[in-house]
Image: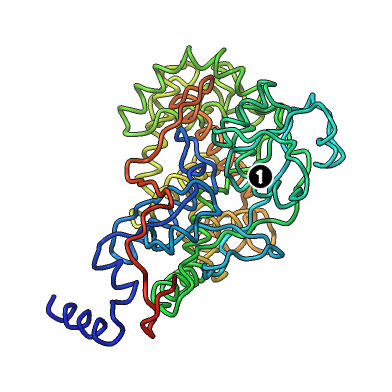
Amino acid sequence: MLATAVVLLLQLATHGQPFLLDEVRDRGLLRVAVPQTTLASDGAQASEVELERDLLQAFAEHLGVTLRFVAVESPAMMPDALAAAAADMAVTALVPTQTRQPGIRYTRPYLEVESVLVRRQDRPSPESLAALANSDKRLAVPINSLQSGLLRRQFEDEEPFWHEIDRPIRDLLYLVWRGEFDYTIADLGMLQRNQRYLPELQANKTLGEPRRLRWGVLDQDDLSLFREAQTFLGTIASDGRMDAMIERHLGDLGDFDYVNSRTFLRHVTGRLPEFRDRFQRAAEQHDLDWRLLAAIGYQESLWDPAAVSHTGVRGVMMLTGATASQLGVDRLDPAESIEGGARYLRSLIDRIPEEIPEPVRTWLALASYNVGLGHVQDARRLTEQLGGDPDAWQDIKDTLPLLSDPEWYPQTRYGQARGREPVIYVSRVRAFHDLLIRITDADLQDPALTTEPDIVPFNGETRPGPRLDWTGNALY
Protein backbone atom coordinates (compact mmCIF):
# COMPACT_ATOMS: atom_id res chain seq x y z
CA MET A 1 0.00 0.00 0.00
CA LEU A 2 2.87 2.37 0.94
CA ALA A 3 4.73 1.46 -2.24
CA THR A 4 1.65 2.25 -4.33
CA ALA A 5 1.29 5.62 -2.66
CA VAL A 6 4.96 6.42 -3.29
CA VAL A 7 4.61 5.54 -6.98
CA LEU A 8 1.52 7.72 -7.31
CA LEU A 9 3.26 10.65 -5.59
CA LEU A 10 6.27 10.33 -7.90
CA GLN A 11 3.98 10.32 -10.93
CA LEU A 12 2.11 13.36 -9.68
CA ALA A 13 5.34 15.21 -9.08
CA THR A 14 6.74 14.29 -12.48
CA HIS A 15 3.70 14.51 -14.69
CA GLY A 16 1.03 16.32 -12.74
CA GLN A 17 -1.20 13.22 -12.46
CA PRO A 18 -0.96 9.42 -12.28
CA PHE A 19 -0.91 7.18 -15.31
CA LEU A 20 -4.38 6.27 -16.59
CA LEU A 21 -3.71 2.56 -16.00
CA ASP A 22 -2.87 3.29 -12.35
CA GLU A 23 -5.96 5.50 -12.06
CA VAL A 24 -8.13 2.61 -13.22
CA ARG A 25 -6.55 0.19 -10.77
CA ASP A 26 -6.67 2.69 -7.91
CA ARG A 27 -10.31 3.44 -8.66
CA GLY A 28 -11.09 -0.28 -8.91
CA LEU A 29 -13.28 0.36 -11.92
CA LEU A 30 -12.82 0.09 -15.69
CA ARG A 31 -15.36 2.30 -17.48
CA VAL A 32 -16.04 1.33 -21.08
CA ALA A 33 -18.08 3.48 -23.46
CA VAL A 34 -20.57 1.42 -25.46
CA PRO A 35 -23.40 2.56 -27.78
CA GLN A 36 -26.77 2.56 -26.03
CA THR A 37 -28.26 0.46 -28.83
CA THR A 38 -25.76 -2.29 -27.98
CA LEU A 39 -26.78 -2.32 -24.33
CA ALA A 40 -30.53 -2.28 -25.01
CA SER A 41 -31.55 -5.90 -25.15
CA ASP A 42 -33.80 -8.54 -23.67
CA GLY A 43 -31.08 -10.98 -22.76
CA ALA A 44 -31.00 -12.57 -26.23
CA GLN A 45 -27.81 -10.82 -27.20
CA ALA A 46 -26.06 -11.06 -30.50
CA SER A 47 -23.23 -13.53 -30.23
CA GLU A 48 -20.72 -10.75 -30.98
CA VAL A 49 -22.13 -8.66 -28.09
CA GLU A 50 -21.85 -11.61 -25.70
CA LEU A 51 -18.27 -12.14 -26.88
CA GLU A 52 -17.50 -8.46 -26.36
CA ARG A 53 -18.79 -8.52 -22.82
CA ASP A 54 -16.83 -11.65 -21.92
CA LEU A 55 -13.70 -10.13 -23.43
CA LEU A 56 -14.08 -6.86 -21.52
CA GLN A 57 -14.84 -8.75 -18.33
CA ALA A 58 -11.68 -10.81 -18.80
CA PHE A 59 -9.64 -7.61 -19.26
CA ALA A 60 -11.19 -6.07 -16.14
CA GLU A 61 -10.34 -9.21 -14.17
CA HIS A 62 -6.82 -9.07 -15.59
CA LEU A 63 -6.55 -5.54 -14.17
CA GLY A 64 -8.14 -6.60 -10.89
CA VAL A 65 -11.04 -4.15 -11.23
CA THR A 66 -14.81 -4.10 -11.79
CA LEU A 67 -16.28 -3.52 -15.25
CA ARG A 68 -18.81 -0.74 -15.83
CA PHE A 69 -20.45 0.27 -19.11
CA VAL A 70 -20.91 3.91 -20.00
CA ALA A 71 -23.85 4.21 -22.39
CA VAL A 72 -23.40 6.79 -25.18
CA GLU A 73 -26.18 7.82 -27.51
CA SER A 74 -24.24 7.04 -30.68
CA PRO A 75 -20.81 5.78 -31.79
CA ALA A 76 -19.96 9.35 -32.82
CA MET A 77 -19.96 10.35 -29.12
CA MET A 78 -17.20 7.92 -28.17
CA PRO A 79 -14.40 10.54 -28.38
CA ASP A 80 -16.46 12.92 -26.24
CA ALA A 81 -16.90 10.32 -23.52
CA LEU A 82 -13.15 9.64 -23.51
CA ALA A 83 -12.17 13.31 -23.64
CA ALA A 84 -14.53 14.13 -20.78
CA ALA A 85 -12.90 11.36 -18.73
CA ALA A 86 -16.34 9.78 -18.32
CA ALA A 87 -14.91 6.56 -19.78
CA ASP A 88 -11.46 4.99 -19.87
CA MET A 89 -11.99 2.91 -23.02
CA ALA A 90 -14.48 2.60 -25.84
CA VAL A 91 -15.77 -0.28 -27.95
CA THR A 92 -15.26 0.60 -31.61
CA ALA A 93 -15.82 -0.96 -35.01
CA LEU A 94 -14.11 0.19 -38.21
CA VAL A 95 -13.92 -0.94 -41.80
CA PRO A 96 -10.37 -0.85 -43.19
CA THR A 97 -11.05 2.12 -45.49
CA GLN A 98 -13.04 4.13 -42.93
CA THR A 99 -11.55 7.35 -41.56
CA ARG A 100 -10.68 6.87 -37.92
CA GLN A 101 -12.37 9.10 -35.39
CA PRO A 102 -10.02 11.86 -34.19
CA GLY A 103 -9.17 11.69 -30.53
CA ILE A 104 -9.12 7.87 -30.34
CA ARG A 105 -6.13 5.53 -30.42
CA TYR A 106 -7.20 2.06 -31.62
CA THR A 107 -6.01 -1.33 -30.44
CA ARG A 108 -5.40 -4.29 -32.70
CA PRO A 109 -8.60 -5.82 -34.16
CA TYR A 110 -9.89 -9.00 -32.54
CA LEU A 111 -12.93 -9.90 -34.68
CA GLU A 112 -14.39 -9.14 -38.10
CA VAL A 113 -18.15 -8.67 -38.41
CA GLU A 114 -20.14 -8.56 -41.65
CA SER A 115 -23.19 -6.33 -42.08
CA VAL A 116 -26.00 -7.78 -44.20
CA LEU A 117 -29.30 -6.52 -45.58
CA VAL A 118 -32.07 -8.63 -44.06
CA ARG A 119 -35.50 -9.43 -45.49
CA ARG A 120 -38.17 -12.08 -45.27
CA GLN A 121 -37.71 -14.73 -47.92
CA ASP A 122 -41.09 -13.76 -49.43
CA ARG A 123 -39.95 -10.15 -49.98
CA PRO A 124 -38.23 -9.08 -53.21
CA SER A 125 -34.48 -8.85 -53.29
CA PRO A 126 -33.33 -5.29 -54.19
CA GLU A 127 -30.45 -4.86 -56.58
CA SER A 128 -28.78 -2.47 -54.16
CA LEU A 129 -29.43 -0.21 -51.20
CA ALA A 130 -29.76 2.71 -53.58
CA ALA A 131 -32.65 0.91 -55.29
CA LEU A 132 -34.64 1.21 -52.07
CA ALA A 133 -34.47 5.01 -52.20
CA ASN A 134 -37.02 5.16 -55.01
CA SER A 135 -39.24 2.30 -53.89
CA ASP A 136 -42.13 1.97 -51.48
CA LYS A 137 -40.25 -0.60 -49.40
CA ARG A 138 -39.39 0.38 -45.86
CA LEU A 139 -35.87 0.00 -44.50
CA ALA A 140 -35.49 0.45 -40.72
CA VAL A 141 -32.36 0.60 -38.55
CA PRO A 142 -31.79 1.47 -34.88
CA ILE A 143 -31.37 5.18 -34.25
CA ASN A 144 -27.79 6.42 -33.72
CA SER A 145 -26.44 2.94 -34.44
CA LEU A 146 -23.57 1.51 -36.46
CA GLN A 147 -26.16 0.55 -39.04
CA SER A 148 -27.49 4.11 -39.36
CA GLY A 149 -23.90 5.36 -39.55
CA LEU A 150 -23.22 2.98 -42.43
CA LEU A 151 -26.19 4.43 -44.34
CA ARG A 152 -25.22 8.03 -43.61
CA ARG A 153 -21.68 7.45 -44.88
CA GLN A 154 -22.91 5.81 -48.07
CA PHE A 155 -25.65 8.38 -48.79
CA GLU A 156 -24.21 11.48 -47.10
CA ASP A 157 -25.38 13.87 -49.85
CA GLU A 158 -28.89 12.45 -50.14
CA GLU A 159 -32.12 12.78 -48.21
CA PRO A 160 -32.45 9.78 -45.85
CA PHE A 161 -34.85 7.20 -47.27
CA TRP A 162 -34.61 4.87 -44.28
CA HIS A 163 -36.36 4.95 -40.92
CA GLU A 164 -34.35 5.25 -37.70
CA ILE A 165 -36.24 3.52 -34.91
CA ASP A 166 -35.58 3.69 -31.17
CA ARG A 167 -35.37 -0.10 -30.80
CA PRO A 168 -32.36 -2.48 -30.77
CA ILE A 169 -31.61 -4.48 -33.89
CA ARG A 170 -33.03 -7.70 -32.45
CA ASP A 171 -36.44 -6.02 -32.17
CA LEU A 172 -36.18 -4.78 -35.76
CA LEU A 173 -35.43 -8.29 -36.98
CA TYR A 174 -38.64 -9.39 -35.30
CA LEU A 175 -40.58 -6.51 -36.89
CA VAL A 176 -39.20 -7.41 -40.34
CA TRP A 177 -40.26 -11.02 -39.72
CA ARG A 178 -43.77 -9.77 -38.85
CA GLY A 179 -43.86 -7.65 -42.01
CA GLU A 180 -44.02 -4.24 -40.31
CA PHE A 181 -40.82 -3.31 -42.15
CA ASP A 182 -39.43 -4.78 -45.34
CA TYR A 183 -35.70 -4.64 -44.58
CA THR A 184 -33.18 -3.95 -41.87
CA ILE A 185 -29.39 -4.14 -41.58
CA ALA A 186 -27.82 -6.49 -39.05
CA ASP A 187 -24.56 -8.19 -38.22
CA LEU A 188 -24.43 -11.66 -39.75
CA GLY A 189 -24.03 -13.35 -36.37
CA MET A 190 -27.10 -11.57 -34.98
CA LEU A 191 -29.12 -12.69 -38.01
CA GLN A 192 -27.94 -16.31 -37.74
CA ARG A 193 -28.86 -16.39 -34.05
CA ASN A 194 -32.34 -15.04 -34.73
CA GLN A 195 -32.97 -17.18 -37.82
CA ARG A 196 -33.38 -20.12 -35.50
CA TYR A 197 -36.74 -18.88 -34.28
CA LEU A 198 -37.49 -16.45 -37.10
CA PRO A 199 -36.50 -18.82 -39.93
CA GLU A 200 -38.17 -16.82 -42.74
CA LEU A 201 -35.47 -14.14 -42.37
CA GLN A 202 -32.73 -14.15 -45.00
CA ALA A 203 -29.48 -12.31 -45.59
CA ASN A 204 -30.01 -10.51 -48.89
CA LYS A 205 -26.43 -9.36 -49.44
CA THR A 206 -23.28 -8.27 -47.65
CA LEU A 207 -22.95 -4.51 -47.31
CA GLY A 208 -19.46 -3.14 -47.76
CA GLU A 209 -16.31 -4.37 -46.07
CA PRO A 210 -16.41 -6.29 -42.78
CA ARG A 211 -16.05 -4.17 -39.66
CA ARG A 212 -13.09 -4.90 -37.43
CA LEU A 213 -13.90 -4.74 -33.73
CA ARG A 214 -11.33 -2.92 -31.61
CA TRP A 215 -10.98 -1.08 -28.34
CA GLY A 216 -10.16 2.61 -28.27
CA VAL A 217 -8.58 4.89 -25.69
CA LEU A 218 -8.01 8.63 -25.64
CA ASP A 219 -5.25 9.58 -28.07
CA GLN A 220 -2.76 11.24 -25.72
CA ASP A 221 0.82 10.94 -24.51
CA ASP A 222 -0.22 8.59 -21.70
CA LEU A 223 -0.18 5.16 -23.39
CA SER A 224 -0.30 3.07 -20.20
CA LEU A 225 -3.84 1.71 -20.58
CA PHE A 226 -3.49 1.41 -24.36
CA ARG A 227 -0.32 -0.67 -24.05
CA GLU A 228 -1.87 -2.88 -21.39
CA ALA A 229 -4.91 -3.49 -23.63
CA GLN A 230 -2.69 -4.26 -26.63
CA THR A 231 -0.59 -6.69 -24.59
CA PHE A 232 -3.70 -8.38 -23.18
CA LEU A 233 -5.28 -8.85 -26.63
CA GLY A 234 -2.01 -10.21 -28.00
CA THR A 235 -1.60 -12.61 -25.08
CA ILE A 236 -5.08 -14.13 -25.25
CA ALA A 237 -4.76 -14.43 -29.04
CA SER A 238 -1.55 -16.41 -28.67
CA ASP A 239 -2.50 -18.59 -25.68
CA GLY A 240 -5.82 -19.72 -27.16
CA ARG A 241 -8.21 -17.89 -24.83
CA MET A 242 -9.50 -15.69 -27.65
CA ASP A 243 -10.22 -18.72 -29.83
CA ALA A 244 -12.00 -20.34 -26.88
CA MET A 245 -14.21 -17.28 -26.40
CA ILE A 246 -15.02 -17.13 -30.11
CA GLU A 247 -15.85 -20.84 -30.13
CA ARG A 248 -18.06 -20.44 -27.08
CA HIS A 249 -20.14 -17.63 -28.56
CA LEU A 250 -19.92 -18.21 -32.31
CA GLY A 251 -19.08 -21.89 -32.69
CA ASP A 252 -22.67 -23.10 -33.01
CA LEU A 253 -23.80 -20.53 -35.59
CA GLY A 254 -24.55 -21.34 -39.20
CA ASP A 255 -25.56 -24.97 -38.64
CA PHE A 256 -29.32 -24.45 -39.02
CA ASP A 257 -31.35 -24.23 -42.17
CA TYR A 258 -34.93 -23.20 -42.85
CA VAL A 259 -36.37 -26.72 -42.74
CA ASN A 260 -34.58 -27.61 -39.49
CA SER A 261 -35.77 -24.42 -37.84
CA ARG A 262 -39.38 -24.79 -38.92
CA THR A 263 -39.45 -28.43 -37.83
CA PHE A 264 -37.93 -27.62 -34.46
CA LEU A 265 -40.35 -24.77 -33.74
CA ARG A 266 -43.28 -26.97 -34.73
CA HIS A 267 -42.16 -29.70 -32.33
CA VAL A 268 -41.52 -27.18 -29.52
CA THR A 269 -45.25 -26.48 -29.45
CA GLY A 270 -46.49 -29.88 -30.63
CA ARG A 271 -44.29 -32.46 -28.88
CA LEU A 272 -42.22 -30.81 -26.13
CA PRO A 273 -45.16 -30.02 -23.78
CA GLU A 274 -45.80 -33.77 -23.35
CA PHE A 275 -42.24 -34.35 -22.09
CA ARG A 276 -41.25 -31.03 -20.53
CA ASP A 277 -42.09 -32.01 -16.93
CA ARG A 278 -40.12 -35.22 -17.30
CA PHE A 279 -37.08 -33.36 -18.64
CA GLN A 280 -37.34 -30.89 -15.76
CA ARG A 281 -37.64 -33.58 -13.06
CA ALA A 282 -34.76 -35.64 -14.46
CA ALA A 283 -32.55 -32.59 -14.91
CA GLU A 284 -33.21 -31.39 -11.36
CA GLN A 285 -32.43 -34.83 -9.97
CA HIS A 286 -29.06 -34.94 -11.77
CA ASP A 287 -28.08 -31.26 -11.52
CA LEU A 288 -28.51 -30.48 -15.23
CA ASP A 289 -30.22 -27.76 -17.25
CA TRP A 290 -33.49 -29.35 -18.42
CA ARG A 291 -33.18 -27.49 -21.72
CA LEU A 292 -29.83 -29.15 -22.39
CA LEU A 293 -31.41 -32.51 -21.67
CA ALA A 294 -34.35 -31.64 -23.95
CA ALA A 295 -31.92 -30.50 -26.68
CA ILE A 296 -30.22 -33.91 -26.56
CA GLY A 297 -33.59 -35.62 -26.74
CA TYR A 298 -34.55 -33.58 -29.78
CA GLN A 299 -31.28 -34.24 -31.58
CA GLU A 300 -31.60 -37.94 -30.80
CA SER A 301 -35.25 -38.60 -31.59
CA LEU A 302 -37.11 -35.38 -32.40
CA TRP A 303 -38.88 -36.13 -29.07
CA ASP A 304 -40.41 -39.25 -30.59
CA PRO A 305 -40.55 -42.12 -28.03
CA ALA A 306 -40.98 -44.68 -30.83
CA ALA A 307 -37.90 -43.56 -32.75
CA VAL A 308 -35.40 -46.22 -33.84
CA SER A 309 -32.05 -45.47 -35.46
CA HIS A 310 -30.27 -47.50 -38.14
CA THR A 311 -27.87 -48.73 -35.44
CA GLY A 312 -30.66 -50.04 -33.23
CA VAL A 313 -30.71 -47.39 -30.49
CA ARG A 314 -34.24 -46.50 -29.43
CA GLY A 315 -36.49 -44.17 -27.48
CA VAL A 316 -36.54 -40.45 -26.68
CA MET A 317 -32.88 -40.40 -25.58
CA MET A 318 -31.77 -43.10 -28.05
CA LEU A 319 -30.03 -45.29 -25.49
CA THR A 320 -28.30 -48.45 -26.67
CA GLY A 321 -29.57 -51.74 -25.30
CA ALA A 322 -26.37 -52.16 -23.28
CA THR A 323 -26.57 -48.69 -21.77
CA ALA A 324 -30.26 -49.06 -20.91
CA SER A 325 -29.54 -52.43 -19.26
CA GLN A 326 -26.64 -50.96 -17.30
CA LEU A 327 -28.85 -48.09 -16.13
CA GLY A 328 -31.74 -50.42 -15.37
CA VAL A 329 -34.29 -48.53 -17.49
CA ASP A 330 -36.83 -49.40 -20.14
CA ARG A 331 -35.67 -47.30 -23.05
CA LEU A 332 -39.11 -47.49 -24.72
CA ASP A 333 -40.75 -45.83 -21.71
CA PRO A 334 -40.38 -42.04 -22.21
CA ALA A 335 -40.02 -41.22 -18.51
CA GLU A 336 -37.43 -43.96 -17.94
CA SER A 337 -35.58 -43.09 -21.15
CA ILE A 338 -35.31 -39.43 -20.12
CA GLU A 339 -34.23 -40.28 -16.58
CA GLY A 340 -31.70 -42.77 -17.92
CA GLY A 341 -30.36 -40.25 -20.42
CA ALA A 342 -29.96 -37.66 -17.67
CA ARG A 343 -28.15 -40.14 -15.42
CA TYR A 344 -25.88 -41.20 -18.29
CA LEU A 345 -25.04 -37.60 -19.23
CA ARG A 346 -24.25 -36.76 -15.60
CA SER A 347 -21.94 -39.77 -15.37
CA LEU A 348 -20.11 -38.62 -18.51
CA ILE A 349 -19.69 -35.06 -17.22
CA ASP A 350 -18.36 -36.40 -13.93
CA ARG A 351 -15.80 -38.53 -15.79
CA ILE A 352 -14.43 -35.57 -17.76
CA PRO A 353 -11.42 -34.10 -15.88
CA GLU A 354 -12.52 -31.37 -13.46
CA GLU A 355 -9.72 -29.05 -14.55
CA ILE A 356 -11.37 -28.64 -17.96
CA PRO A 357 -13.50 -25.50 -17.68
CA GLU A 358 -17.16 -25.23 -18.51
CA PRO A 359 -18.75 -25.21 -21.00
CA VAL A 360 -16.01 -27.33 -22.67
CA ARG A 361 -16.47 -30.07 -20.08
CA THR A 362 -20.14 -30.37 -21.02
CA TRP A 363 -19.35 -30.29 -24.74
CA LEU A 364 -16.91 -33.17 -24.30
CA ALA A 365 -19.60 -35.07 -22.41
CA LEU A 366 -22.02 -34.45 -25.29
CA ALA A 367 -19.45 -35.76 -27.78
CA SER A 368 -19.03 -38.80 -25.53
CA TYR A 369 -22.81 -39.33 -25.45
CA ASN A 370 -22.65 -39.58 -29.23
CA VAL A 371 -19.44 -41.46 -29.96
CA GLY A 372 -18.29 -42.85 -26.60
CA LEU A 373 -16.00 -41.50 -23.91
CA GLY A 374 -13.09 -43.68 -25.00
CA HIS A 375 -13.05 -42.19 -28.49
CA VAL A 376 -13.20 -38.66 -27.05
CA GLN A 377 -10.22 -39.51 -24.83
CA ASP A 378 -8.42 -40.77 -27.94
CA ALA A 379 -9.17 -37.46 -29.68
CA ARG A 380 -7.78 -35.51 -26.73
CA ARG A 381 -4.56 -37.54 -26.84
CA LEU A 382 -4.25 -37.01 -30.59
CA THR A 383 -4.87 -33.30 -30.11
CA GLU A 384 -1.98 -33.07 -27.66
CA GLN A 385 0.21 -35.20 -29.94
CA LEU A 386 -0.43 -32.75 -32.79
CA GLY A 387 0.47 -29.73 -30.65
CA GLY A 388 -3.07 -28.64 -29.83
CA ASP A 389 -4.74 -28.03 -26.48
CA PRO A 390 -6.48 -31.23 -25.26
CA ASP A 391 -8.70 -29.11 -23.02
CA ALA A 392 -9.92 -26.80 -25.82
CA TRP A 393 -12.97 -27.77 -27.85
CA GLN A 394 -11.84 -25.70 -30.84
CA ASP A 395 -8.76 -27.97 -31.09
CA ILE A 396 -10.46 -31.27 -30.19
CA LYS A 397 -13.22 -30.83 -32.78
CA ASP A 398 -10.51 -30.53 -35.46
CA THR A 399 -8.96 -33.79 -34.27
CA LEU A 400 -12.10 -35.91 -33.84
CA PRO A 401 -12.50 -36.52 -37.62
CA LEU A 402 -9.06 -38.19 -37.60
CA LEU A 403 -10.65 -41.13 -35.74
CA SER A 404 -11.99 -42.31 -39.10
CA ASP A 405 -8.67 -41.75 -40.91
CA PRO A 406 -6.64 -44.97 -41.51
CA GLU A 407 -3.46 -42.95 -41.00
CA TRP A 408 -4.45 -42.00 -37.47
CA TYR A 409 -6.93 -44.36 -35.82
CA PRO A 410 -4.43 -47.26 -35.58
CA GLN A 411 -2.52 -45.04 -33.14
CA THR A 412 -5.49 -44.78 -30.78
CA ARG A 413 -6.49 -46.99 -27.86
CA TYR A 414 -10.15 -47.44 -28.83
CA GLY A 415 -9.73 -47.63 -32.59
CA GLN A 416 -11.81 -46.38 -35.47
CA ALA A 417 -14.87 -44.15 -34.99
CA ARG A 418 -17.08 -41.87 -37.07
CA GLY A 419 -15.28 -38.81 -35.77
CA ARG A 420 -17.16 -36.18 -37.77
CA GLU A 421 -20.49 -37.13 -36.24
CA PRO A 422 -19.79 -35.92 -32.67
CA VAL A 423 -18.60 -32.55 -34.01
CA ILE A 424 -21.92 -32.06 -35.83
CA TYR A 425 -23.80 -33.54 -32.87
CA VAL A 426 -22.34 -31.09 -30.33
CA SER A 427 -22.93 -28.14 -32.63
CA ARG A 428 -26.59 -29.03 -33.11
CA VAL A 429 -27.27 -29.77 -29.45
CA ARG A 430 -25.71 -26.42 -28.57
CA ALA A 431 -27.95 -24.73 -31.12
CA PHE A 432 -31.11 -26.46 -29.85
CA HIS A 433 -30.11 -25.66 -26.26
CA ASP A 434 -29.57 -22.01 -27.12
CA LEU A 435 -32.96 -21.86 -28.82
CA LEU A 436 -34.74 -23.42 -25.87
CA ILE A 437 -33.08 -20.96 -23.49
CA ARG A 438 -34.24 -18.03 -25.58
CA ILE A 439 -37.73 -19.40 -26.05
CA THR A 440 -38.26 -20.19 -22.38
CA ASP A 441 -36.54 -17.09 -20.97
CA ALA A 442 -37.94 -14.41 -23.27
CA ASP A 443 -41.34 -13.48 -24.64
CA LEU A 444 -40.59 -13.51 -28.35
CA GLN A 445 -43.92 -11.94 -29.25
CA ASP A 446 -43.23 -8.75 -27.33
CA PRO A 447 -39.50 -8.26 -26.80
CA ALA A 448 -38.77 -6.39 -23.59
CA LEU A 449 -35.92 -3.91 -23.40
CA THR A 450 -33.73 -4.06 -20.33
CA THR A 451 -30.19 -3.04 -19.46
CA GLU A 452 -27.61 -4.41 -17.10
CA PRO A 453 -27.56 -2.78 -13.66
CA ASP A 454 -23.96 -1.56 -13.81
CA ILE A 455 -24.49 0.91 -16.65
CA VAL A 456 -24.27 4.68 -16.40
CA PRO A 457 -25.35 7.15 -19.10
CA PHE A 458 -23.10 9.70 -20.76
CA ASN A 459 -24.94 12.70 -22.21
CA GLY A 460 -21.91 14.65 -23.37
CA GLU A 461 -22.32 17.40 -20.80
CA THR A 462 -20.22 16.21 -17.88
CA ARG A 463 -16.65 17.39 -18.23
CA PRO A 464 -14.76 16.79 -14.96
CA GLY A 465 -11.76 18.83 -16.03
CA PRO A 466 -9.06 18.51 -18.67
CA ARG A 467 -6.73 15.55 -18.83
CA LEU A 468 -3.17 16.80 -19.21
CA ASP A 469 -0.49 15.45 -21.45
CA TRP A 470 2.97 14.93 -20.04
CA THR A 471 4.05 18.49 -20.94
CA GLY A 472 1.34 19.91 -18.74
CA ASN A 473 -0.74 21.19 -21.68
CA ALA A 474 -4.50 20.56 -21.70
CA LEU A 475 -5.65 18.22 -24.45
CA TYR A 476 -8.91 20.18 -24.90
Residue 310 lies, in percent from the top left, at 67, 29
> On screen, 275 above or below 168?
above
Residue 203 lies, in percent from the top left, at 74, 38
What residue is shown with label 1? Answer: 188
Residue 277 lies, in percent from the top left, at 39, 16
Residue drawn at (45%, 59%) of the image:
391
User: Viewed as shown, does residue 460 lie left or right of 402?
Assistant: left
Kind of residue at disc 1: Leu
Residue drawn at (28%, 64%) of the image:
64
User: Viewed as shown, does residue 464 lie left or right of 240?
Assistant: left
As rendered, which of 341 and 296 lies closer to the eye? 296
> On screen, 15 above or below 140?
below
User: Viewed as shown, does residue 88 lie left or right of 270?
Assistant: left
Residue drawn at (20%, 82%) of the image:
9
As rendered, which of 270 and 443 lies closer to the eye? 443
> On screen, 71 above or below 201?
below
As rendered, which of 194 and 423 lies closer to the eye? 194
**Where on the picture, by quarter, is residue 163?**
top right
**Where on the picture, by quarter, is residue 340?**
top left
**Where on the picture, by quarter, is residue 55?**
bottom left
As rendered, which of 462 and 111 lies closer to the eye? 462
Residue drawn at (46%, 67%) of the image:
217
> On screen, 458 above or below 122?
below
| Mark 1 surroundings: few (<14), some (14-19) or many (≥20) residues within 10 A | many
The image's colour scheme reads: rainbow
Give the quadrant of the C terminus.
Answer: bottom left
Q: How many marks?
A: 1
Label 1 secondary element: helix
User: Viewed as shown, does residue 30 lie left or right of 201?
Assistant: left
Give the quadrant of the N terminus.
Answer: bottom left
